[in-house]
Every structure is written in structure tokens, then in C-alpha cells.
Amino acid sequence: MEYSDADPSFRARFVEPKFDPNLFIQSIASQSIGSEGLVNMKRRMYLISSEAKTDLKYNAFRNHTKFIETAKQVAALESEVYQLQSLLADEKQLLSTVKESLTIEAKSDSSATLETDACQSLLRHCQSLDLVSANPDRRLIYSGKLLEVKLDPSTKVPSSSHTTQPCYGLLCTDCFVIAKSSNIRTATAYDVDQVIKLQRNSLNTSDNDAHKQYSSSSVRIINVKDDVLRNAFTIQYNTDTITMMCESAQIKKNWIELFESLFYTRMRRLSRIASFQTEQEQVFQEEFFAEDWITTTEENLTILLAERNLQQALKLILQARKYAKDFLSQHKQQSLPFVDDYIKNIQEKEQDLRRIVEKEILSMCEHGCSTNLLKHYYQRIEILKQLGYVPKACDLFFTIQFSLMKNTLKQTKIEELNVVFVENFANTFFTRLVDSYYEFVQIFKDQRSTFTKFIVWMSNEIEKLITILHNQQYIGTKNFTFSMRNIDILFTKAEEFSVKLIDVKFILEEQLEQILTQIIRSQKEFIIDSLRQRHRDEKWIPVTFQTHDRLNQLFYEFHELGIEGNTLLEPFIIEEQTSDVLQIDLAPSTLQFTKAYLTFARDLFKVYYTSINYAIVEALVELIKLHLKYYERTLKKTNDMNLKKFIMKNVEFSLNYLFRYVEELYTPKIGIATKHLTKVYGKLNKLRNLAEA
């Protein structure tokens, strides 16, 4: 019978229960003729043997691996069983404590009386036991009399050279109190000497500052095994060491066991709390980073900032802010450091975004802002505003406005001493100011507190405008009438702006007050110098006009000053009937002063406001008084009655016509006639007396 290598029946014969090797060999030998059949059979047997060895090795390795895994599982189960045994032991101890407490509560009144007596006895021993009762979370575990061993200062090793001092020890849940007696001989009443904290949290007591308190980051209890100091144990804390001696070995054992039990319980509690907190934090962390975009926020922000895609960066930052805020509000009672780290990283990206926006705007402003790019500028401002950097956004907005104002004013053509330029310049300035106001309101309409900054910026810009015009002599002391016209233009534009938007006229008045005061005083001095020169050369003869046309020209000059000349001069005109010659019964210096005085008064009237009222009234009164002073000097020097009459006509004209007109002009502005103006009329009687003398 031939068998192939893959024949299953051939292989199956070896695993049969009744397989007999001898019978198998006899069967093969009887069936095989020649050596060829035996060689083939040998080869088949060798192959089967090799396969059997390989299978055996594989099965042995697989069983060994399973054995190791099983051993690990058994070890883990043993560890869990051990932990369960520890937990059961703790629970058993807790149940025993509860049982004992219940038993104590169930005792009779006599037992309660005994406990009260024991507590009172303890109070008698330690007068500062209120240190224990002051904290409701603190419990007294053990107490008793001890001897504090004072070692030789030259050595910390126990030796025969030592002294002892009676004391009283109280072991609490969070501290160890050492009380000593002030009376060494009796040692019946004690006061607190040292407090050694066994926990990191502070003591909620009102201890006297004289008590020594030690923070116990590490407290160790060491059993002293020494023939000299028997029944002693050492307390090591920080860099200090205290050695306590007990009355007996059993009391020493109780102290050491209670200390170690307290430390072990605390370590177990802290370990469990830390383990629980770690597991809970991992759960919260998985919940927080559940969404994919949260885990890639920082990388995405870095890419967006590098690409200058600031709007998308802003959107992602605001989304991350809201997500973190909502998560914290849902877990208010938990400490989540990973959320704090996440928020800190987002804030760093916020700062990067703020710096990019600030640098971009400042760079554009240095090269000059363009009105065509205002929308782009304000988008950047809006980014800072939404991030919460409102003050910085406000400052950058004003930086843009300053650059725009500067470029806009440069476009106005400068023409020397040209009122048209000032009008165009002021019109350009206030037009840009109106645009700035509307743009500011559009961006910061929900930030009312920033309007104060806008007023300050606007005041600074108005100050710069006045400085430019003053430096270019468009407002100055060289040309009084020209300066007054330019100031009047500024007030007109400011009034138009105030009617439309907000009042800026008071800002302009405040900025111009000092300059206007200087201009008024300068012009007053100029008129005084001219008045002196005219009176020095005065001949005291009437003014003569050869034709009516020349008189009409004089009337026109007064008309330009805002007064009808024929009405003002009619009482003093003398017309000769024999010829066309006309006379005005006034001196030439009087007419020259009248024109200068009216020009001065009318120009100041156009720009009048309350702050410069005193300077204007003072100048008007001083000029008219000086003018009358020259009349007074002439009256004193002459005895010619005709000359005196002629001078009095000039005095009457100056006071009753010229000065009265100016007074009536300013009364509506001032509100009432000031005493400085009314006092001037008192000069008339004095001059009349001089003329009649």
C-alpha cells in the first residue's frame, strides 16, 4: 500500500490509541520490496518527525506566553485584593469608631458626668486648651504629661549631661501642642509654649503671637533607643528637634503609634484625593478637547497670522474664547489647569494679532494715509475693538485721522496774506473734522466712554490749526484787520460745525484767548503811538473840503466802518454860502482817531466773546481817555476862548457821538453797561470847567 506525504490516513495511524510501533514496522517491511521503498518511508518519517518537533516548540512557546499573561493577571488580582483588604480594614476601623461613638452616646448620665469631669480635669492641667476647641474641624486625639529633654548644647546626641522639664502634650488632628508650666515646682497648670503644625493649612485660631508656631512641611517621629534616655521619642521638624520622655514604655508606644497612625491616615487621604483629581481632570480634558478644531487652534492661528488673514484669525480667537468661557461656566467648581493653559496660549496669539494690526497701521500712516483705503484701515480698527483693545483701537484711529488731516491740509495752496487761503484752509479742516466725527461714531457708537478721547483729539487738532495760521502770520500782530477777518472765518466755520454736530466753538475760543489778547494790546499800542504823533502836529483848525465829492468819500469811509457818516458828522458840518467850500468843525486828529477807533471797535466786535471782554473794554476805555487827555493838555495851555470852544466841540463829538456809538454797539454783547464805560462820561464836566476858566 502506497502512502503519499499528504495522506491524512497515514498520519492518523500515529495518533491512534492502539498504535503499535512493532506491528507498523513489520507491515512496512512486508509490503516494501527492495531498498527504494524503505528509503521513501524513511524520508516520510523524517518529515513527520520534523513537523512534530516544530509543532511541539510552537505549542510550548504559546503555552509559556499564556502562562506569563496569566501570572500578570493573577498579580493584578492579588494587588486589587490587597487594596480591597486595606479598604475593608479602614471601613472596619471606621465602623468600630462609629460603634464606639454610638456606644458612648448611649451611656448613662453617670458616664457623661465622668467624661465631663475628665475634660474639666484636662482643662485644669492646660489652661490654653481653647486652642483645640476654637477650631470646629480640630479634634483632640491624645494627651498626657511628658518630660522635655534639654540636651547639652555642644552635642545633639543623647548623653548623661541633660536636663528635663515637665510639660503637657496634646496631639490633635492637625497639630501637636506643647504646654509648659510657669511654676516648675507645682506643675499643675500649663500654658501653650509651642505649636507644631502637622498639616500645611493654617490654624484657624486666635493664638497669642508669643506662642511658637512651626509649619510642618515635614515632621518625623523617631523612636529613641538609648540606655540613657529610656522611654523617649524625638520629634524632628524643619531644622529643630525636640526630645520627649514618657513615664513608661507603654505610654511611649501609644504616642508613637498615634503619631504614625495620624500621618498614615493623612497620606492615604491625600493620595486618594490626588488620584481622584487626576482621573477627574483627565475626563474633563477629554471632554474639552473632544472637537478637532480645539486641538488645532494654535496651529491654525499661526498659519492665519502668517498669511495675514486677520479676519479669520479674529473669528477663530473669538470662537475659542467663547468655547473656553462656556466650558468653565459649566464646571465652576473644578480646577482646570489645562483650560487655563489653553486660554493663555490663545491670549498670546491675540497679542501677536494686535501687534500685527498696530504695526500695519503705523507703517501706513508714516507713508501717508489715503482716503481710498479708509475702509481697509477701519477693518483693522474693528479687529482690535472686537478683541477688547478699545483704548488701543481708539489711539490708532486718531493716528489715522492725524495723518489724513495732515495730507488734506497740504493740498491747500498757500498764498501770502490771502483771506481766500484761510477760508479754504478752514473749510478743508472742518470738512475733514466732520468726516472724522461720523467715522468715529460709526466705529465706536457702542463705546460711549471713548467720546472724551475724541474731544481731546479734536482740541489738539484745533490747536495745531491755530499754530499753523499763527506761525504763517495769518493770525498775528502785524496786520490787525487781516487777523480779525481770519479769526472771524474760523469762528464762522466752528459755528457751522457746532450746529451740525457738537460744540467746538468753546475750544476755539480757549485756544485763541492768549493770541487775541496779545493782538489787542499790540494794536492798542499802535493806535496810541499814532495818536501821539497826530496831536503833536495838530494845528487845531477845522477840516476843509473843497468839493462835495470829497465829503461824500469821507461819508463812504464811515459807511464801511458800519456807521452813517452824514448822521454822525451832520451837526458839525459848516457850508459857506459864498462858495462850494465845506468845513467840518472838527480837528484833523479827531477825524483820524475816529476812523482808527471805529475800525478797532468794529473788528473786535466781530470776534467778541466773554473771555476777552476785559481786554476789549480795557483797550477801548484806555484809548478814549488818552484821546481826551490831549484835549485837556491843550485847554490848560491856551487862553484863547475861540480855541477852547473849538476844542470843546471835539470833546463833545468824541464823547457824545463816537464813544456813545461804541458803547451802544457793545452793550448787547456785554449785557449791561460796564462801570469802565460809564466813568468816561465824567471827563466831560472836568473839561468844560477848564474851557470856562
Image (tube, grey):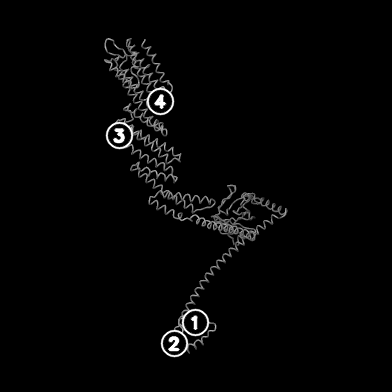
Residue 235 drawn at (x, y percent): 58, 57
Residue 271 badge: none
Instruction: Between label 1 and label 2, give the one nearer the viewer.
Output: 1
> Is residue 82 toward the left or the right of residue 42 in the image?
right
Crowd rating for badge 1 (residues with CA inside 10 Å; few <14, some 14–19, many 20+): few
Q: Amino acid at mark 3?
A: Ile
Q: Are marks 3 and 2 in contact (CB under 8 Å)?
A: no
Q: Secondary structure at mark 3?
A: loop
Mark 1 or mark 3: whose residue is earlier in sequence: 1
Residue 38 drawn at (x, y percent): 45, 87
Q: CA distance from mark 2 to mark 4?
A: 144 Å
Residue 613 badge: 4
Q: Amino acid at mark 1?
A: Ser
Q: CA distance from mark 3 to mark 2?
A: 127 Å
Instruction: Confirm whether residue 15 shows in the render.
Output: yes
Q: What residue did someone put label 2 on?
A: 37
Q: What residue did someone put label 3 on?
A: 414
Instruction: Between label 1 and label 4, give the one nearer the viewer.
Output: 1
Residue 309 drawn at (x, y percent): 39, 50
> Is residue 558 toward the left or the right of residue 290 in the image?
left
Q: Are marks 3 and 4 in contact (CB under 8 Å)?
A: no
Crowd rating for badge 2 (residues with CA inside 10 Å; few <14, some 14–19, many 20+): some
